[in-house]
Image (cartoon, rainbow, N blue to C red):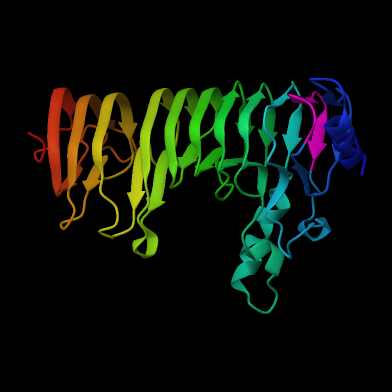
Amino acid sequence: MAFKDAWKDVCKSSSCSPIIQVPSGKSFLLQPLTFNGECKPDQIIFQIDGTMKAPSDPSDWKCQEHRYCKQWIAFDEVDNLMIRGSGTVDGQGSTWWERRSSCKDHKHRDKRVCGRKPTGLVISHSQNVHLEGLTFKDSPQMHMAFERSERVYASNLTIQAPGDSPNTDGIHLQHARNIFIDHSDDCISIGHGSSHINITRIACGPGHGISIGSLGIDGENETVEDVHVSDVVFTETTNGVRIKTWQSSAVKISNIRFENIYGTSHRKPAVNIACSKSVPCTDIVLSNVHLEAADDGDGDDGDEPSTYCANVQGHARGHVFPPLTCLS
């Protein structure tokens, strides 16, 4: 209630830029909560210098509108929002992950845990939102999602979860436009309807890498365009850079550049460009790519990494290793 009351106060404030402050040295237990827009000030600052914690036991989560918690903290229809500070947003997701094994037992399965797990922080239907300096940790599922929002700027964020935590993506984008993510730690997934995405100076791993998709489920015509990713270090990720589509003629992949990529790969094949026979990938360019086979401890570290290429039209420029015979 304290957070609800504080939000009501800043929305009614006569100040042009009121501040909600979570003070340093303090820890606050917060139930799932949505902060709605229609506020009077030109800008609201949410200053988090302390720690915000979700209930540690899934059965203690009190969802406001849904039987199952879709998210923990949400900002909906809030324009000109600044969320910043040196504090921590802790989703306490370990109990959610530990109970996964019980989901296989239909007699004892917990519907809340076995269903879709909540996202930590959601920004939805909002414009001109800035996130800066915070640490996010141990969300039950995705740590952050930007949905149906424009002009979101995320910088200097630290996102932490154990390597074996399930589907705890760092940031997920869905129907998001003009998104800038800079100098942050964790992996990113980009869903359909997203465009004009700029991602730079990211340290990603463990995790799934940086992924676009999946696109085209049930034949849906879905679009992602104008995505730029640069200056990324992947460490022990299951993939590096990946575009995922369903086997559907609804999705055509074209105008893709993989440039200046260097490293080692455990994955076989290390480069996998498998496109549709009915809708081939076109204008795919690899330029200055060098991947060595990682040492798996079996004595085969000197082997050349393998590749797979099908239904692709494109070019290889500069140094490309391992070579792809399907690219001219």
- Relative placement, left or right, of 140 versus 241 is right
For residue 228, above or below residue 74: above
Taking the image as shown, residue 117 lies to the left or right of residue 27, namely left
Q: In this picture, is 167 found above or below 109?
A: above
Residue 135 drawn at (x, y percent): 68, 28
Residue 142 vs residue 223: left or right?
Answer: right
In this picture, which residue range is highlighted in magenta? 39-53
Q: Residue at x 79, y 26 (%)?
A: 41
> Who is closer to the viewer here, 300 or 1?
1
Visible in this render: residue 286? yes
Image-quadrant location for residue 307? top left
Q: Residue at x 87, y 37 (%)?
A: 8
Query: Number of callouts in the render?
Result: 0
Task: Give how far across and how far down residue 105 sits, in percent.
Answer: 63, 74
Q: Could you say where residue 107 lies in the image, as x and y percent from the top left?
A: 68, 79
Residue 102: x, y in percent?
65, 67
